[in-house]
Amino acid sequence: MPATFAGFACLTKALIFKGENEDMGIPRAARTQRRTRIQEEKEEQILEAALDVFSVHGFRGSTIDQIAEVAGMSKPNLLYYFRTKEAMHRALIDRVLDTWLEPLRAFDAEGDPESEIRSYIRRKLEMARDYPRESRLFANEMLQGAPHVEDELKGPLKSLVDEKAEVIRAWARAGKIAKCDPYHLIFSIWSTTQHYADFDVQVRAVLGQEHAGEGRFEDAARFLEQLFIGGLGVRHAVKAG
Amino acid sequence: MPATFAGFACLTKALIFKGENEDMGIPRAARTQRRTRIQEEKEEQILEAALDVFSVHGFRGSTIDQIAEVAGMSKPNLLYYFRTKEAMHRALIDRVLDTWLEPLRAFDAEGDPESEIRSYIRRKLEMARDYPRESRLFANEMLQGAPHVEDELKGPLKSLVDEKAEVIRAWARAGKIAKCDPYHLIFSIWSTTQHYADFDVQVRAVLGQEHAGEGRFEDAARFLEQLFIGGLGVRHAVKAG
DNA sequence: CGATAATTTGACCGTTTGGTAAACATTACA
DNA sequence: TGTAATGTTTACCAAACGGTCAAATTATCG
Protein backbone atom coordinates (compact mmCIF):
# COMPACT_ATOMS: atom_id res chain seq x y z
CA MET A 1 0.00 0.00 0.00
CA PRO A 2 2.69 2.53 0.86
CA ALA A 3 4.38 1.72 -2.43
CA THR A 4 1.19 2.55 -4.29
CA PHE A 5 0.85 5.86 -2.52
CA ALA A 6 4.47 6.76 -3.15
CA GLY A 7 4.08 5.91 -6.81
CA PHE A 8 0.96 8.03 -7.01
CA ALA A 9 2.61 10.99 -5.36
CA CYS A 10 5.49 10.72 -7.78
CA LEU A 11 3.19 10.59 -10.78
CA THR A 12 1.13 13.54 -9.60
CA LYS A 13 4.22 15.58 -9.00
CA ALA A 14 5.58 14.71 -12.40
CA LEU A 15 2.36 15.73 -14.11
CA ILE A 16 1.99 18.98 -12.25
CA PHE A 17 5.52 20.15 -12.76
CA LYS A 18 5.81 18.83 -16.32
CA GLY A 19 7.44 21.40 -18.52
CA GLU A 20 7.97 23.79 -15.69
CA ASN A 21 11.03 21.99 -14.41
CA GLU A 22 12.11 19.33 -16.85
CA ASP A 23 15.35 18.23 -15.24
CA MET A 24 13.94 16.64 -12.13
CA GLY A 25 15.94 13.65 -11.13
CA ILE A 26 18.96 14.67 -13.16
CA PRO A 27 21.89 15.75 -11.02
CA ARG A 28 22.96 19.35 -11.29
CA ALA A 29 26.33 18.40 -12.71
CA ALA A 30 24.67 16.68 -15.65
CA ARG A 31 22.47 19.65 -16.39
CA THR A 32 25.43 21.77 -17.37
CA GLN A 33 26.04 22.64 -21.00
CA ARG A 34 29.34 20.86 -21.41
CA ARG A 35 30.78 17.85 -19.69
CA THR A 36 33.92 18.97 -17.95
CA ARG A 37 37.10 17.26 -16.85
CA ILE A 38 36.12 17.97 -13.24
CA GLN A 39 32.83 16.16 -13.64
CA GLU A 40 34.53 13.01 -14.84
CA GLU A 41 37.16 13.11 -12.13
CA LYS A 42 34.74 13.74 -9.30
CA GLU A 43 32.20 11.17 -10.42
CA GLU A 44 35.02 8.65 -10.59
CA GLN A 45 36.19 9.68 -7.14
CA ILE A 46 32.68 9.37 -5.69
CA LEU A 47 31.99 5.96 -7.21
CA GLU A 48 35.32 4.74 -5.89
CA ALA A 49 34.35 5.81 -2.37
CA ALA A 50 30.82 4.49 -2.80
CA LEU A 51 32.25 1.10 -3.74
CA ASP A 52 34.28 1.11 -0.54
CA VAL A 53 31.22 1.78 1.57
CA PHE A 54 28.39 -0.05 -0.22
CA SER A 55 30.47 -3.21 -0.60
CA VAL A 56 30.88 -3.49 3.16
CA HIS A 57 27.60 -2.24 4.57
CA GLY A 58 25.10 -2.82 1.79
CA PHE A 59 22.69 -0.20 0.54
CA ARG A 60 20.68 0.47 3.67
CA GLY A 61 23.64 0.24 5.98
CA SER A 62 25.62 2.86 4.08
CA THR A 63 25.25 6.59 4.55
CA ILE A 64 25.97 9.48 2.24
CA ASP A 65 28.08 11.12 4.94
CA GLN A 66 30.24 8.02 5.12
CA ILE A 67 30.79 8.01 1.37
CA ALA A 68 31.47 11.74 1.43
CA GLU A 69 34.12 11.31 4.08
CA VAL A 70 35.86 8.53 2.18
CA ALA A 71 35.67 10.55 -1.02
CA GLY A 72 37.08 13.54 0.79
CA MET A 73 34.31 15.92 -0.12
CA SER A 74 31.22 17.42 1.46
CA LYS A 75 27.84 15.74 1.37
CA PRO A 76 26.11 18.44 -0.70
CA ASN A 77 28.97 18.18 -3.13
CA LEU A 78 28.26 14.48 -3.64
CA LEU A 79 24.63 15.31 -4.22
CA TYR A 80 25.66 17.78 -6.88
CA TYR A 81 26.92 14.83 -8.92
CA PHE A 82 24.40 12.19 -7.88
CA ARG A 83 20.98 13.40 -6.88
CA THR A 84 20.25 10.57 -4.44
CA LYS A 85 21.91 7.68 -2.63
CA GLU A 86 20.06 5.35 -4.95
CA ALA A 87 21.54 7.10 -7.98
CA MET A 88 25.06 6.46 -6.70
CA HIS A 89 24.26 2.83 -6.07
CA ARG A 90 22.70 2.36 -9.47
CA ALA A 91 25.59 4.01 -11.28
CA LEU A 92 27.96 1.76 -9.38
CA ILE A 93 26.05 -1.42 -10.18
CA ASP A 94 25.74 -0.52 -13.84
CA ARG A 95 29.44 0.15 -14.13
CA VAL A 96 30.57 -2.96 -12.31
CA LEU A 97 28.10 -5.51 -13.70
CA ASP A 98 29.65 -5.58 -17.15
CA THR A 99 33.22 -6.18 -16.09
CA TRP A 100 32.04 -8.73 -13.58
CA LEU A 101 30.51 -10.92 -16.26
CA GLU A 102 33.49 -10.69 -18.59
CA PRO A 103 35.15 -13.94 -17.51
CA LEU A 104 32.00 -15.91 -18.30
CA ARG A 105 31.73 -14.24 -21.70
CA ALA A 106 35.25 -15.40 -22.48
CA PHE A 107 34.14 -18.99 -21.93
CA ASP A 108 34.64 -20.37 -25.41
CA ALA A 109 32.73 -23.08 -27.22
CA GLU A 110 35.67 -23.76 -29.51
CA GLY A 111 38.09 -24.50 -26.70
CA ASP A 112 38.43 -27.85 -24.96
CA PRO A 113 36.79 -28.34 -21.53
CA GLU A 114 40.01 -28.66 -19.60
CA SER A 115 41.65 -25.41 -20.66
CA GLU A 116 38.38 -23.48 -20.69
CA ILE A 117 37.37 -24.52 -17.19
CA ARG A 118 40.90 -24.05 -15.95
CA SER A 119 41.22 -20.52 -17.28
CA TYR A 120 37.70 -19.61 -16.16
CA ILE A 121 38.58 -20.61 -12.60
CA ARG A 122 41.86 -18.70 -12.76
CA ARG A 123 40.18 -15.59 -14.11
CA LYS A 124 37.45 -15.68 -11.48
CA LEU A 125 40.00 -16.19 -8.72
CA GLU A 126 42.06 -13.28 -10.00
CA MET A 127 38.98 -11.12 -9.88
CA ALA A 128 38.22 -12.23 -6.33
CA ARG A 129 41.78 -11.28 -5.41
CA ASP A 130 42.02 -8.00 -7.32
CA TYR A 131 38.43 -6.76 -7.11
CA PRO A 132 37.01 -8.05 -3.83
CA ARG A 133 34.89 -4.95 -3.31
CA GLU A 134 33.02 -5.55 -6.54
CA SER A 135 32.34 -9.11 -5.49
CA ARG A 136 31.05 -8.02 -2.11
CA LEU A 137 28.88 -5.36 -3.67
CA PHE A 138 27.03 -8.04 -5.60
CA ALA A 139 26.98 -10.42 -2.68
CA ASN A 140 25.31 -7.76 -0.55
CA GLU A 141 22.80 -7.15 -3.31
CA MET A 142 22.00 -10.88 -3.55
CA LEU A 143 21.59 -11.29 0.20
CA GLN A 144 19.03 -8.52 0.17
CA GLY A 145 17.05 -10.22 -2.56
CA ALA A 146 18.49 -8.20 -5.44
CA PRO A 147 15.97 -5.35 -5.15
CA HIS A 148 18.00 -3.23 -7.57
CA VAL A 149 19.22 -5.77 -10.12
CA GLU A 150 16.54 -8.41 -10.46
CA ASP A 151 15.87 -7.43 -14.07
CA GLU A 152 19.52 -7.77 -15.01
CA LEU A 153 19.60 -11.24 -13.45
CA LYS A 154 16.55 -12.52 -15.27
CA GLY A 155 17.55 -10.85 -18.54
CA PRO A 156 21.17 -10.52 -19.62
CA LEU A 157 22.65 -12.82 -16.99
CA LYS A 158 20.23 -15.66 -17.59
CA SER A 159 20.73 -15.40 -21.36
CA LEU A 160 24.48 -15.55 -21.00
CA VAL A 161 24.35 -18.53 -18.66
CA ASP A 162 21.86 -20.32 -20.89
CA GLU A 163 24.26 -19.90 -23.78
CA LYS A 164 27.26 -21.20 -21.85
CA ALA A 165 25.24 -24.07 -20.40
CA GLU A 166 24.61 -25.18 -23.97
CA VAL A 167 28.36 -25.19 -24.60
CA ILE A 168 28.88 -27.48 -21.64
CA ARG A 169 26.08 -29.77 -22.77
CA ALA A 170 27.71 -30.01 -26.17
CA TRP A 171 30.96 -31.08 -24.51
CA ALA A 172 29.11 -33.80 -22.65
CA ARG A 173 27.45 -35.01 -25.87
CA ALA A 174 30.87 -35.13 -27.50
CA GLY A 175 32.16 -37.24 -24.62
CA LYS A 176 34.70 -34.63 -23.59
CA ILE A 177 33.23 -34.36 -20.12
CA ALA A 178 30.93 -36.45 -17.96
CA LYS A 179 27.20 -35.78 -18.15
CA CYS A 180 26.40 -33.19 -15.50
CA ASP A 181 24.07 -30.31 -14.82
CA PRO A 182 25.73 -27.34 -16.53
CA TYR A 183 23.89 -24.74 -14.45
CA HIS A 184 25.04 -26.18 -11.15
CA LEU A 185 28.54 -26.54 -12.55
CA ILE A 186 28.59 -22.81 -13.25
CA PHE A 187 27.11 -22.06 -9.82
CA SER A 188 29.82 -24.10 -8.16
CA ILE A 189 32.59 -22.25 -9.98
CA TRP A 190 31.02 -18.93 -9.05
CA SER A 191 30.61 -19.82 -5.41
CA THR A 192 33.99 -21.42 -4.82
CA THR A 193 35.91 -18.56 -6.39
CA GLN A 194 33.88 -15.64 -5.04
CA HIS A 195 34.10 -17.20 -1.61
CA TYR A 196 37.68 -15.95 -1.37
CA ALA A 197 36.49 -12.37 -1.77
CA ASP A 198 33.20 -12.46 0.11
CA PHE A 199 34.31 -14.59 3.05
CA ASP A 200 37.86 -13.29 3.17
CA VAL A 201 37.86 -12.77 6.96
CA GLN A 202 36.72 -16.31 7.55
CA VAL A 203 39.29 -17.75 5.17
CA ARG A 204 42.06 -15.77 6.84
CA ALA A 205 40.88 -16.70 10.32
CA VAL A 206 40.71 -20.41 9.55
CA LEU A 207 43.99 -20.56 7.67
CA GLY A 208 45.70 -18.70 10.50
CA GLN A 209 48.53 -16.24 10.19
CA GLU A 210 50.99 -18.72 8.72
CA HIS A 211 48.97 -19.58 5.60
CA ALA A 212 46.89 -16.44 5.23
CA GLY A 213 49.41 -14.58 3.08
CA GLU A 214 48.62 -13.87 -0.54
CA GLY A 215 49.72 -17.40 -1.33
CA ARG A 216 46.26 -18.58 -0.38
CA PHE A 217 45.00 -17.63 -3.83
CA GLU A 218 47.61 -19.84 -5.45
CA ASP A 219 46.68 -22.69 -3.12
CA ALA A 220 43.02 -22.15 -3.91
CA ALA A 221 43.72 -22.18 -7.64
CA ARG A 222 45.63 -25.43 -7.34
CA PHE A 223 42.90 -27.09 -5.30
CA LEU A 224 40.02 -25.90 -7.47
CA GLU A 225 41.72 -27.08 -10.66
CA GLN A 226 42.22 -30.43 -9.02
CA LEU A 227 38.58 -30.54 -7.95
CA PHE A 228 37.07 -29.50 -11.25
CA ILE A 229 39.54 -31.12 -13.63
CA GLY A 230 41.24 -34.13 -12.10
CA GLY A 231 38.75 -34.96 -9.37
CA LEU A 232 39.49 -35.87 -5.77
CA GLY A 233 39.96 -39.53 -6.51
CA VAL A 234 37.66 -40.71 -3.77
CA ARG A 235 37.88 -44.50 -3.63
CA HIS A 236 34.80 -46.61 -3.12
CA ALA A 237 34.96 -48.14 0.30
CA VAL A 238 35.14 -51.91 0.14
CA LYS A 239 33.32 -53.62 2.97
CA ALA A 240 35.28 -56.14 4.99
CA GLY A 241 37.84 -57.11 2.33
CA MET B 1 41.17 8.67 19.63
CA PRO B 2 37.37 8.79 20.00
CA ALA B 3 37.46 5.11 20.95
CA THR B 4 39.90 5.88 23.74
CA PHE B 5 37.75 8.67 25.05
CA ALA B 6 34.61 6.53 24.88
CA GLY B 7 36.36 3.74 26.72
CA PHE B 8 37.51 6.15 29.38
CA ALA B 9 34.05 7.59 29.81
CA CYS B 10 32.65 4.09 30.19
CA LEU B 11 35.22 3.14 32.77
CA THR B 12 34.68 6.33 34.73
CA LYS B 13 30.95 5.85 34.70
CA ALA B 14 31.27 2.27 35.81
CA LEU B 15 33.50 3.23 38.70
CA ILE B 16 31.35 6.11 39.83
CA PHE B 17 28.10 4.22 39.76
CA LYS B 18 29.50 0.95 41.05
CA GLY B 19 27.22 -0.48 43.66
CA GLU B 20 24.67 2.21 43.28
CA ASN B 21 23.10 0.65 40.20
CA GLU B 22 24.45 -2.84 39.66
CA ASP B 23 22.25 -3.99 36.81
CA MET B 24 23.49 -1.65 34.12
CA GLY B 25 23.48 -3.31 30.77
CA ILE B 26 21.17 -6.07 31.87
CA PRO B 27 17.73 -5.89 30.28
CA ARG B 28 14.83 -5.21 32.59
CA ALA B 29 13.25 -8.57 31.85
CA ALA B 30 16.33 -10.36 33.19
CA ARG B 31 16.33 -8.32 36.39
CA THR B 32 13.05 -9.79 37.55
CA GLN B 33 12.94 -12.24 40.42
CA ARG B 34 11.72 -15.27 38.53
CA ARG B 35 12.06 -16.18 34.89
CA THR B 36 8.58 -16.37 33.47
CA ARG B 37 6.96 -18.22 30.60
CA ILE B 38 6.29 -14.87 28.97
CA GLN B 39 9.96 -13.97 29.01
CA GLU B 40 10.92 -17.10 27.13
CA GLU B 41 8.13 -16.73 24.61
CA LYS B 42 8.79 -13.08 23.89
CA GLU B 43 12.55 -13.46 23.62
CA GLU B 44 11.97 -16.27 21.16
CA GLN B 45 9.52 -14.12 19.24
CA ILE B 46 11.95 -11.21 19.11
CA LEU B 47 14.93 -13.29 17.98
CA GLU B 48 12.76 -14.82 15.29
CA ALA B 49 11.89 -11.36 13.97
CA ALA B 50 15.47 -10.16 14.39
CA LEU B 51 16.64 -13.07 12.27
CA ASP B 52 14.22 -12.04 9.54
CA VAL B 53 15.54 -8.50 9.50
CA PHE B 54 19.26 -8.87 10.27
CA SER B 55 19.69 -11.68 7.74
CA VAL B 56 18.48 -9.44 4.93
CA HIS B 57 19.83 -6.01 5.80
CA GLY B 58 22.83 -6.71 8.00
CA PHE B 59 23.45 -5.06 11.33
CA ARG B 60 23.73 -1.44 10.29
CA GLY B 61 20.95 -1.68 7.72
CA SER B 62 18.44 -3.03 10.22
CA THR B 63 16.39 -0.92 12.59
CA ILE B 64 14.76 -1.71 15.90
CA ASP B 65 11.45 -0.38 14.61
CA GLN B 66 11.61 -2.83 11.72
CA ILE B 67 12.24 -5.75 14.05
CA ALA B 68 9.50 -4.54 16.37
CA GLU B 69 7.02 -4.42 13.53
CA VAL B 70 7.87 -7.94 12.36
CA ALA B 71 7.71 -9.20 15.95
CA GLY B 72 4.34 -7.50 16.38
CA MET B 73 5.27 -5.53 19.47
CA SER B 74 6.27 -2.01 20.37
CA LYS B 75 9.84 -0.77 20.28
CA PRO B 76 10.11 -0.09 24.02
CA ASN B 77 8.83 -3.58 24.57
CA LEU B 78 11.70 -5.04 22.56
CA LEU B 79 14.09 -2.96 24.60
CA TYR B 80 12.58 -4.39 27.74
CA TYR B 81 13.96 -7.78 26.71
CA PHE B 82 17.15 -6.69 24.95
CA ARG B 83 18.72 -3.49 26.13
CA THR B 84 20.28 -2.56 22.78
CA LYS B 85 20.24 -3.47 19.12
CA GLU B 86 23.67 -5.00 19.57
CA ALA B 87 22.37 -7.22 22.38
CA MET B 88 19.73 -8.64 20.03
CA HIS B 89 22.31 -9.28 17.35
CA ARG B 90 24.73 -10.90 19.74
CA ALA B 91 22.06 -13.16 21.24
CA LEU B 92 21.08 -14.19 17.74
CA ILE B 93 24.64 -14.95 16.64
CA ASP B 94 25.36 -16.92 19.80
CA ARG B 95 22.25 -19.02 19.36
CA VAL B 96 22.75 -19.73 15.68
CA LEU B 97 26.51 -20.31 15.59
CA ASP B 98 26.37 -23.62 17.40
CA THR B 99 23.73 -25.26 15.26
CA TRP B 100 25.42 -23.90 12.17
CA LEU B 101 28.62 -25.77 12.91
CA GLU B 102 26.90 -29.02 13.77
CA PRO B 103 27.27 -30.64 10.34
CA LEU B 104 31.03 -30.15 10.44
CA ARG B 105 31.22 -31.63 13.93
CA ALA B 106 29.46 -34.72 12.64
CA PHE B 107 32.26 -35.20 10.12
CA ASP B 108 33.69 -38.47 11.37
CA ALA B 109 37.26 -39.74 11.26
CA GLU B 110 36.09 -43.33 11.48
CA GLY B 111 33.92 -43.17 8.40
CA ASP B 112 35.14 -43.58 4.84
CA PRO B 113 35.69 -40.47 2.69
CA GLU B 114 32.89 -41.18 0.26
CA SER B 115 30.05 -41.51 2.73
CA GLU B 116 31.38 -38.77 5.03
CA ILE B 117 31.77 -36.20 2.26
CA ARG B 118 28.47 -37.24 0.74
CA SER B 119 26.52 -36.84 3.95
CA TYR B 120 28.31 -33.61 4.84
CA ILE B 121 27.23 -32.12 1.52
CA ARG B 122 23.68 -33.34 2.00
CA ARG B 123 23.47 -31.95 5.52
CA LYS B 124 24.85 -28.59 4.47
CA LEU B 125 22.44 -28.42 1.55
CA GLU B 126 19.52 -29.28 3.81
CA MET B 127 20.53 -26.45 6.10
CA ALA B 128 20.76 -24.05 3.17
CA ARG B 129 17.26 -25.11 2.18
CA ASP B 130 15.68 -25.17 5.63
CA TYR B 131 17.59 -22.37 7.36
CA PRO B 132 18.49 -19.83 4.68
CA ARG B 133 18.13 -16.90 7.08
CA GLU B 134 20.79 -18.28 9.37
CA SER B 135 23.13 -18.68 6.43
CA ARG B 136 22.49 -15.12 5.28
CA LEU B 137 23.01 -13.78 8.77
CA PHE B 138 26.53 -15.16 8.76
CA ALA B 139 27.16 -14.12 5.18
CA ASN B 140 26.24 -10.55 6.07
CA GLU B 141 28.56 -10.73 9.04
CA MET B 142 31.42 -12.00 6.87
CA LEU B 143 30.91 -9.36 4.19
CA GLN B 144 31.23 -6.68 6.84
CA GLY B 145 34.50 -8.11 8.06
CA ALA B 146 33.04 -10.08 10.98
CA PRO B 147 33.14 -7.19 13.46
CA HIS B 148 31.05 -9.18 15.94
CA VAL B 149 32.36 -12.72 15.55
CA GLU B 150 36.04 -12.48 14.73
CA ASP B 151 37.00 -14.15 18.00
CA GLU B 152 34.70 -17.09 17.35
CA LEU B 153 36.26 -17.53 13.91
CA LYS B 154 39.84 -17.52 15.13
CA GLY B 155 39.04 -19.64 18.14
CA PRO B 156 36.40 -22.40 18.10
CA LEU B 157 35.88 -22.43 14.33
CA LYS B 158 39.57 -22.62 13.47
CA SER B 159 40.12 -25.39 16.02
CA LEU B 160 37.26 -27.42 14.62
CA VAL B 161 38.46 -27.00 11.06
CA ASP B 162 42.03 -27.82 12.02
CA GLU B 163 40.80 -31.03 13.55
CA LYS B 164 38.76 -32.03 10.52
CA ALA B 165 41.56 -31.07 8.16
CA GLU B 166 43.72 -33.60 9.95
CA VAL B 167 41.07 -36.25 9.31
CA ILE B 168 41.17 -35.51 5.61
CA ARG B 169 44.97 -35.59 5.58
CA ALA B 170 44.85 -39.00 7.22
CA TRP B 171 42.55 -40.24 4.46
CA ALA B 172 45.04 -39.02 1.88
CA ARG B 173 47.91 -40.76 3.68
CA ALA B 174 45.88 -43.96 3.69
CA GLY B 175 45.32 -43.61 -0.05
CA LYS B 176 41.57 -43.31 0.34
CA ILE B 177 41.55 -39.94 -1.37
CA ALA B 178 43.92 -37.99 -3.59
CA LYS B 179 46.36 -35.64 -1.92
CA CYS B 180 44.69 -32.27 -1.69
CA ASP B 181 44.55 -29.18 0.48
CA PRO B 182 42.03 -30.09 3.20
CA TYR B 183 41.27 -26.46 4.11
CA HIS B 184 40.34 -25.49 0.59
CA LEU B 185 38.30 -28.66 0.28
CA ILE B 186 36.26 -27.60 3.29
CA PHE B 187 35.95 -24.06 1.94
CA SER B 188 34.65 -25.38 -1.35
CA ILE B 189 31.98 -27.47 0.35
CA TRP B 190 30.91 -24.50 2.46
CA SER B 191 30.74 -22.14 -0.48
CA THR B 192 28.97 -24.42 -2.93
CA THR B 193 26.27 -25.40 -0.47
CA GLN B 194 25.69 -22.05 1.21
CA HIS B 195 25.47 -20.47 -2.23
CA TYR B 196 21.96 -21.89 -2.55
CA ALA B 197 20.86 -19.94 0.52
CA ASP B 198 22.87 -16.74 0.15
CA PHE B 199 22.45 -16.30 -3.62
CA ASP B 200 18.96 -17.77 -3.81
CA VAL B 201 17.58 -14.94 -5.97
CA GLN B 202 20.35 -15.36 -8.48
CA VAL B 203 19.94 -19.12 -8.61
CA ARG B 204 16.20 -18.77 -9.16
CA ALA B 205 16.66 -16.08 -11.78
CA VAL B 206 19.20 -18.08 -13.78
CA LEU B 207 17.33 -21.37 -13.56
CA GLY B 208 14.14 -19.66 -14.65
CA GLN B 209 10.63 -20.50 -13.59
CA GLU B 210 10.68 -24.01 -14.99
CA HIS B 211 13.59 -25.30 -12.92
CA ALA B 212 13.41 -22.99 -9.91
CA GLY B 213 11.03 -25.17 -7.95
CA GLU B 214 12.22 -26.89 -4.82
CA GLY B 215 13.72 -29.59 -7.03
CA ARG B 216 16.76 -27.39 -7.46
CA PHE B 217 18.13 -28.62 -4.15
CA GLU B 218 17.92 -32.21 -5.32
CA ASP B 219 19.65 -31.28 -8.56
CA ALA B 220 22.31 -29.43 -6.62
CA ALA B 221 22.88 -32.41 -4.34
CA ARG B 222 23.27 -34.72 -7.31
CA PHE B 223 25.71 -32.42 -9.04
CA LEU B 224 27.81 -31.69 -5.97
CA GLU B 225 28.13 -35.38 -5.12
CA GLN B 226 29.26 -35.99 -8.67
CA LEU B 227 31.78 -33.14 -8.43
CA PHE B 228 33.24 -34.07 -5.06
CA ILE B 229 33.02 -37.84 -5.29
CA GLY B 230 33.08 -39.07 -8.84
CA GLY B 231 34.67 -36.09 -10.54
CA LEU B 232 33.62 -34.43 -13.78
CA GLY B 233 35.64 -36.77 -15.96
CA VAL B 234 37.30 -34.04 -17.95
CA ARG B 235 39.33 -35.67 -20.72
CA HIS B 236 42.76 -34.40 -21.61
CA ALA B 237 42.64 -32.75 -25.01
CA VAL B 238 44.86 -34.54 -27.52
CA LYS B 239 46.57 -32.19 -29.94
CA ALA B 240 46.16 -32.90 -33.64
CA GLY B 241 45.78 -36.68 -33.46
C1' DC C 1 -10.00 -10.73 46.33
C1' DG C 2 -5.88 -7.60 47.06
C1' DA C 3 -1.18 -6.55 46.51
C1' DT C 4 2.95 -7.04 44.46
C1' DA C 5 5.74 -8.19 40.57
C1' DA C 6 5.97 -8.27 35.60
C1' DT C 7 4.82 -6.37 31.25
C1' DT C 8 3.42 -2.90 27.85
C1' DT C 9 2.92 1.57 25.96
C1' DG C 10 2.79 6.68 24.56
C1' DA C 11 5.42 10.53 24.82
C1' DC C 12 9.68 12.07 24.47
C1' DC C 13 15.03 13.14 23.78
C1' DG C 14 19.31 13.88 21.39
C1' DT C 15 21.51 12.35 17.23
C1' DT C 16 21.85 10.84 12.58
C1' DT C 17 19.87 10.48 8.25
C1' DG C 18 18.75 11.82 3.19
C1' DG C 19 18.22 15.81 1.00
C1' DT C 20 17.59 21.19 -0.10
C1' DA C 21 18.43 26.38 -0.63
C1' DA C 22 21.13 29.85 -1.30
C1' DA C 23 25.31 32.16 -0.82
C1' DC C 24 29.96 31.81 -2.07
C1' DA C 25 34.15 30.38 -4.80
C1' DT C 26 36.25 28.91 -8.88
C1' DT C 27 36.86 27.90 -13.62
C1' DA C 28 36.52 28.46 -18.63
C1' DC C 29 36.36 31.18 -22.39
C1' DA C 30 35.20 35.34 -25.37
C1' DT D 1 40.11 40.85 -17.90
C1' DG D 2 35.27 40.33 -17.35
C1' DT D 3 31.52 37.49 -16.93
C1' DA D 4 28.72 33.68 -17.28
C1' DA D 5 28.89 28.85 -16.28
C1' DT D 6 30.45 25.60 -13.13
C1' DG D 7 31.66 23.94 -8.67
C1' DT D 8 31.65 24.06 -3.38
C1' DT D 9 30.13 25.01 1.14
C1' DT D 10 27.41 26.61 5.16
C1' DA D 11 23.25 26.40 7.25
C1' DC D 12 19.32 24.14 7.47
C1' DC D 13 15.02 20.85 7.25
C1' DA D 14 11.84 16.95 8.23
C1' DA D 15 11.98 12.26 9.03
C1' DA D 16 14.02 8.29 11.03
C1' DC D 17 17.07 6.58 14.30
C1' DG D 18 18.55 4.26 19.03
C1' DG D 19 17.16 4.63 23.37
C1' DT D 20 14.74 6.42 28.01
C1' DC D 21 11.02 7.29 31.27
C1' DA D 22 7.10 7.21 33.87
C1' DA D 23 2.63 5.89 33.75
C1' DA D 24 -0.69 2.38 32.68
C1' DT D 25 -1.85 -2.37 32.15
C1' DT D 26 -1.72 -7.20 32.99
C1' DA D 27 -0.29 -11.50 35.20
C1' DT D 28 0.83 -14.04 39.56
C1' DC D 29 -0.03 -15.78 43.85
C1' DG D 30 -1.02 -15.74 48.86
Image (cartoon, coloured by chain):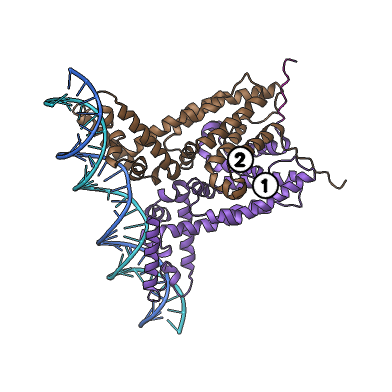
Chain colours: A purple, B brown, C cyan, D blue
Label at residue A120 = 1
Residue A12 vs residue B123: left or right?
left
Mark 2: give few (<14), some (14-19) or many (20+) Cα within 10 Å: few
Give the magenta range.
Answer: A233-240
Give the residue drawn at x 43%, y 62%: A82
Give the residue drawn at x 51%, y 29%: B101
Q: Quadrant of residue A192?
A: top right
What percent of the width, then of the height, locates residue B102? 52, 26
Q: Which amino acid lies under the numbered mark 2 shown in the image of this protein?
A: Gly
What percent of the width, then of the height, locates residue A15? 39, 71
Relative depth, front residue between A179 and A56: A179
Residue A33 vertical position relative to residue B97 in the rendered view, above or below: below
What percent of the width, then of the height, locates residue B9? 26, 37
Q: Is residue A223 visible?
A: no
Q: Is residue B236 visible?
A: yes
Q: Quadrant of residue A9?
A: bottom left
Q: Main secondary structure of the magenta part?
A: loop
Residue B44 vertical position relative to residue A142 in the rendered view, above or below: above
Q: Judging from the image, what secondary structure is the residue with disc 1 in?
A: helix
Residue A144 vs residue B126: left or right?
left
Which residue is most to the right? B241
Which residue is most to the top? A240
Give the residue drawn at x 71%, y 32%: B230
Residue A8 vs residue A142: left or right?
left
Label at residue B215 = 2
For marks 1 and 2, give the one nearer the viewer: 2
Q: Which amino acid lies under the numbered mark 1 shown in the image of this protein?
A: Tyr
Q: Is residue A237 magenta?
A: yes
Please state, as top left, top right, bottom left or bottom right, where the C terminus of chain B lies in the image: top right
User: How far, Cα to Cα, is label 1 from label 2?
Assistant: 28 Å
What percent of the width, then of the height, locates residue A125? 62, 44
